[in-house]
Structure formats: structure tokens, C-alpha cells
């Protein structure tokens, strides 16, 4: 059975564990080929709802809110 010759120091152990954390906070954004908005790779575009050139989710169109005067357009 393999046994380490020397004990692993606290600093060496900390350096080994610290190497994993940079992957968690790193985000790469790319532009959507359909609308040009910034989106994460391998995710549905939040602004147009497309993924790999196909519409996956339907995005609700922005509707005009009625004015406060009570007038209808």
C-alpha cells in the first residue's frame, strides 16, 4: 500500500484546494446568433428564447400599459 513519505503541509493542501474555485466564478458570455444579446454558452437566450437556431421558449411581447389618465389609445 502506498504511504506518503512526508506529511502534506497546510500551505500545500491549501494551494491544491484553492485551484478548484476559479472555475466556479468564471463566466464566459457569448453573443446570441439570432438577436445579438449576451448569453451563456449552452443556454437558451433569455431575450429571444432560441437555442441552436430553434425557438425553444416563447417570450411574451412587451405590452403597453394603460395611461394613468384613463384614456384608451
Image (cartoon, helix red, strand yellow):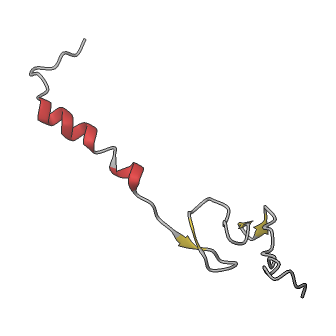
In the rendered image, residue 14, in percent from the top left (x then y), is placed at: 20, 36
Name the residue rendered at 47%, 64% in the picture.
28
- Residue at image coords 68%, 71%: 47
Residue 9 location in percent, x, y? 11, 29
66 sits to left or right of 10: right
Quarter-of-image position of residue 18: top left
Q: Quadrant of the N terminus?
A: top left
Report the residue that reaches farthest toward the front.
69
- Using the rendered view, name the quadrant where residue 44 is placed: bottom right
- Residue 58 lies, with reference to residue 35, above or below; the image says above
* Position above or below: 17 against 72: above
Q: In the rendered image, which quarter contains the C terminus?
A: bottom right
Q: Give x and y (percent) for residue 8.
A: 14, 26
Q: Give the farthest residue toward the right.
A: 72
Which image quadrant is residue 43 in? Answer: bottom right
Q: Residue furthest bottom?
A: 73
Q: Is residue 31 left or right of residue 17?
A: right
Going 88% across and 85% down the picture, which residue do you hit? Answer: 71
Q: Position of residue 24 (x, y in %)?
A: 41, 49
Q: Would residue 60 appear left or right of 40 to someone viewing this image?
A: right
Amino acid at each position: 500500500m502506498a504511504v506518503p513519505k512526508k506529511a502534506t503541509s497546510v500551505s500545500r493542501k491549501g494551494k491544491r484546494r484553492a485551484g478548484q474555485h476559479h472555475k466556479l466564478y468564471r463566466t464566459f458570455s457569448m453573443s446570441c446568433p439570432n438577436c445579438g444579446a449576451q448569453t451563456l454558452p449552452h443556454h437558451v437566450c433569455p431575450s429571444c428564447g432560441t437555442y441552436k437556431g430553434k425557438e425553444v421558449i416563447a417570450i411574451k411581447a412587451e405590452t403597453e400599459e394603460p395611461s394613468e389618465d384613463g384614456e384608451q389609445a
